[in-house]
Amino acid sequence: MGLFKKKNVKKSYDRECMKPIIRASICTGEQVAGFKDMQTGKLEEIMLIKSPKDLDDFKNMFGITEEIEKEY
């Protein structure tokens, strides 16, 4: 019964002021994907990364093709 499907809507971000980044915890291994403001250093958290599929979903959602840097 596929009456309602999830729409794949491309979202955007300011590529000149923000860069995609993954913040990873050294202790627990938890990873959060988001965007870091290059001027202030503040991270806007978008989603929790539990598996490689979550990372692919994050990249597809925002149209990111390059490798995402990890920050510990």
Image: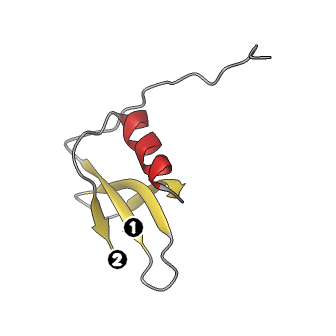
Q: Report the residue at 50% width, 58% height from top.
A: 49
Residue 22, x across and y down, in percent: 37, 61
Residue that numbered label 1 is attached to: 23
Task: Give the image location of residue 47, x and y in percent.
Answer: 52, 52
Instruction: Name which residue lies at 48% across and 47% down.
Output: 53
Q: Provide the residue designation for mark 2.
A: 72
Circle 1: element type = strand
Which amino acid does the dot numbered 1 rest on? Answer: Arg
Quadrant where the image shows the C terminus = bottom left
Residues at circles 2 and 1 in contact by the CB criterion of under 8 Å: yes
Query: Total of numbered circles in the picture?
Result: 2
Q: Name the residue at 30% across, 66% down.
A: 70
- Please give left or right for residue 22 compared with residue 38 in the image: right
Residue 69, quarter of the rendered image: bottom left
**Where residue 50 sits: x, y (%)?**
54, 60
Left/right of residue 3 with respect to residue 24 in the rendered view: right
**Which class describes the residues within 10 Å of circle 2: few (<14), some (14-19), or many (20+)?**
few
Q: Label 2 is placed on what type of residue?
A: Tyr
